[in-house]
C-alpha cells in the first residue's frame, strides 16, 4: 500500500455479515465461490482478526451481499446498514508498537528474559525499533535495551514524554 490514503472504489460500500464464531473463513470462501460463478458486483471480501464472528463485503449494495450468502449454514444474519471505510481502516493498517510508546511510559515486558517485569521507558531508538528501559521490579535501577515489540503499555504518561 502506498503512502497516500487508499480509498475504496467509487460507489462501493461495506456491509457486515454475522457468522458462526470461527467460521468466518468458510463463509468468505463460500461467498467467493458463488461470486466467481454468478459474477456479482462484490469488490472484496474481508475476514478481519479483530472482528470475530463477522465477514465484511465491499459491494455496491446490501441486496447483492444478501443474495450471495443466502442459505449458507454458517451465516446468521446480515447487519443492517453499511459501514464506513473509516470504521474498518484501523483493522487494516497496523501501527508499529514503537509509534505508541513515549519516554516515561510504564510498560510490561511480554517476551525475552525479563518477561512479566514492569519498566519505565528511559529512551527510544525509533530507527532501530529499540527502547532503553529501567526495570521497576528490581531493588536497584537497571537500564536495559530491548526490542520495542517486547513491550506493552501499562500506563501512558501525561504529555507523552
Image (cartoon, grey):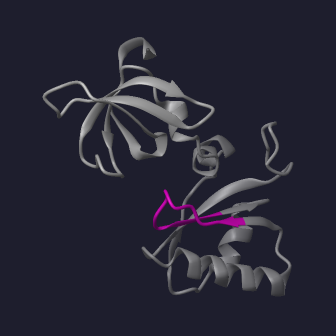
- Most foreground residue, 43 or 40: 43
Magenta stretch encompasses residue 48: yes
| Residue 58 placement (x, y as % from top left) | 73, 60
Give the residue displayed 17% in from the left and 33% down from the top: 138
In this orientation, does residue 155 appear?
no
Residue sticking out furthest to the left: 139
Give the residue displayed 68% in from the left and 79% down from the top: 31
Give the residue displayed 79% in from the left and 59% down from the top: 60
Residue 109 location, quadrant: top left
In this picture, residue 70 sits left or right of residue 100: right
In this picture, residue 93 sits left or right of residue 77: right
Give the residue displayed 57% in from the left and 86% down from the top: 72
Quarter of the image containing the C terminus?
A: top left
In this picture, residue 90 sits left or right of residue 146: right
Up/down of 156 relative to 63, above or below:
above
Tell me the magenta residue range. Answer: 45-56
Amino acid at each position: 500500500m502506498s503512502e497516500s490514503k487508499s480509498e475504496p472504489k467509487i460507489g462501493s460500500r461495506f456491509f457486515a455479515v454475522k457468522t458462526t464464531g470461527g467460521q468466518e473463513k468458510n463463509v468468505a470462501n463460500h461467498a467467493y465461490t458463488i461470486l466467481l460463478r454468478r459474477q456479482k458486483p462484490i469488490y472484496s471480501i474481508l475476514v478481519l482478526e479483530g472482528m470475530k464472528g463477522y465477514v465484511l463485503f465491499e459491494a455496491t449494495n446490501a441486496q447483492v451481499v444478501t443474495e450471495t450468502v443466502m442459505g449458507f449454514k454458517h451465516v446468521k444474519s446480515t447487519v443492517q446498514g453499511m459501514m464506513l471505510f473509516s470504521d474498518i481502516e484501523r483493522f487494516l493498517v497496523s501501527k508499529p508498537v514503537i509509534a505508541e510508546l513515549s519516554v516515561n511510559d510504564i510498560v510490561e515486558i511480554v517476551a525475552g528474559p525479563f518477561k512479566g517485569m514492569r519498566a519505565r521507558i528511559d529512551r527510544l531508538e525509533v530507527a532501530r525499533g529499540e527502547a532503553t528501559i529501567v526495570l521497576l521490579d528490581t531493588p536497584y535501577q537497571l537500564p536495559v535495551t530491548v526490542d520495542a515489540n517486547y513491550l506493552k503499555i501499562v500506563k501512558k504518561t501525561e504529555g507523552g514524554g
